[in-house]
Image (cartoon, rainbow, N blue to C red):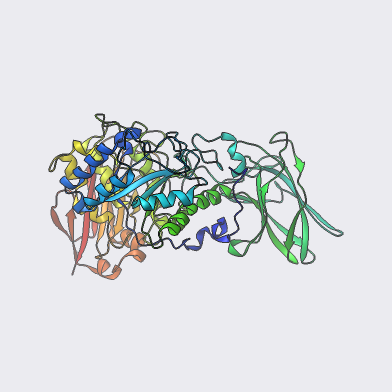
Amino acid sequence: MSMGPKKIEDKAYRYDAFANGQVLLEKKKGHLPAMGWNSWNAFGSGNTEALTKAMADKMVELGLDKLGYRYIVLDDGCYKPERVEGLLSNEEVKFPSGFKALSDYVHDRGLKFGMYNDIGTNLCAGAAVGTCGHEMQDAKSYIEWGVDFLKVDNCYYLWDNVTFSDATNAKYVYAPNIKAIKLVRGDFMTQLSAVSDGVLRGMRAEKKEEYVTCIGTFDGTGPGPSPVGDRSGELCFTVKVPEAGEYLLTVTYATGVEEGVGSWLQAAVGEGETSALFYDDFLAATESPETFAESQEIPVTLQAGENVLRLMNHRRQENTLSSYAALLEGLNAAAPGHDVILSICEWGKTQPQNWGYKVGDSWRILNDITFRVGSDGDPGVGTWVDGYTPSVTSQYNKAVIMDEFAGLHKGWNDPDMLMIGMNGLSLTQCETHMAMWCMMNAPLMLGLDLRRVQKGDELWKIISNEALIALNQDALGIQAKRIYCSLEKEHPDTEYVTNRDRVDILAKPLSDGSVALSFLNVSEKEDNGAHSVDIDTILRFLGGKMTDKEAFAKAGSYTVTDLWTGEETINTTGVFGVFGLEACANVTVRVTANA
């Protein structure tokens, strides 16, 4: 394997192009959120061919296929631990018939077949069969096996300090600490202090007493930072020079190999897609992050007058985008015109809400929703609350304010698989879990052993609720927006709220002109308050996204349909609310304007 990430020649893969709305490699648009079943939460690495066949059969028996659940996805644990003559191969004890035979079995039942890999050298469970450096041949294998869905993880990734990777890989994803810069051309020379003359952009870089540090991108794996806003930081200087031409830039810097300080520097002049990048590589290592040295001279081209010089490191995002793009490129080469769903699973580490739409159909937003997966005979454990990511509310708290990143022409925020049917969650919590994911246009990937479900039982009623599924699969393809939060009055749609003792109201515009509202008690305590929104509030937040705003605004009355009970009521006030919600409960309704 090479000593560093590949050089990025195409500006379309650069940070400055992330916001241009353009997909790469002819990625197909218009996919609604994927629905199906994934083996990980149910069986972990212990999934087998026999269990997978049983899940496919059960999917059909339960009628879930008719409701849109189509993908049967093998997660980690299905390959041999090493490549065979450079190729991926089935683990022969657990998958004796091979992947093509299993794919045929799934397809014969009218379902779609999915598989799993990783952009690193190894899979998360350890098998040394990651796609890194093998993208073309692996994509060819997947096409030959009839794969319709590919979930791609991020363990053992060489260019970041991800799970199971070398922690010192942070050297790739942060710039060095920077104290000063110098620009020289002929007799002209100017020196600028990073602290007193530099301007920080974004939200990651920090000024210390003598230098600037943390020039890079927030690690989004955990629930700490908000996903909204510019999650990368830069050190910028406005430099004024007497004439146009080439100047020599020298940076006073100190390197590190830890989160917040690295060795890789990018130096650019200008902003946006017209910017010019003049350096993109390591600087020589220093003794410590506080032992400063001068860099080699870096030629940069400046215009006469004022210029914006940017020192940065966006490689955490650029490298990861490039690695996922390599797989899409391989799929395109193996099967031009393919319709394989690419599910990006890098756990929100590199803020994929900024770039995931370019190559992926969905992107995970956090680490796993449960670390207590099941096995054959053990349903595993799901939780409602956790201080880190493994809970319904940890995932929901982040995903609920990410609606502007999602859409039919982009893809979907993925707060991980459904834990409905695992131990640890009550039926009320399972119902609200389902409502949340449907409203947020999350992929609906069941994670339970389907043999625990019987047609007509309580679990079946939750996962087969056609009215809720219709919200998730609505043709308009707009993620619900939080328009009310009992703990955040001013900016309920963008403020990251992690305190669970609250009630949220989500609103989702639908293709027929109606609006879905979900009243959610996020708390494990009963709420006895009154919570409501009116027509003006709905229109203020959703107006530009609705198919017929005027008709909705001017209606004399509204039909309100409870999507759990089917009960219909007529509303003439234009105020929609609840008074009291049980712990973890939801009321989800569809509001239709009457002529």
Residue, x 33% and y 50% (percent of image)?
A: 442
Against 384, residue 19 (above or below) is: below
Q: Position of residue 70 (x, y in %)?
A: 26, 51
- Where in the figure is residue 277, as x and y percent of width and height? 66, 58
Q: Nearer the viewer, residue 174 or 82?
A: 82
Q: Nearer the viewer, residue 551 or 271?
A: 271
Would you say 514 lies left or right of 11 here?
left
Q: In the drawing, does residue 367 fall left or right of residue 293?
A: left
Q: Is residue 525 above or below residue 482?
A: above
Q: At 45% across and 36% down in the image, what residue appears?
A: 82
Q: Is residue 492 visible?
A: no
Q: Position of residue 556 (x, y in %)?
A: 19, 67
Residue 341 percent across, percent down from the top left: 37, 54
Q: Is residue 161 visible?
A: yes
Quadrant in the picture for the N terminus: top right
Which is nearer the eye, 266 or 51? 51
Number of numbered labels in the structure image: 0
Depth check, front residue: 88 or 237? 88
Image quarter of the C terminus: bottom left
Q: Residue furthest front?
A: 85
Residue shown at the point (75%, 57%) measured from the top left? 299
Q: Residue at x 33, y 39 (%)?
A: 392
In the rendered image, the residue lying farthest to the right is 187
Q: Quadrant of residue 581?
A: top left
Q: Is residue 166 left or right of residue 530?
A: right
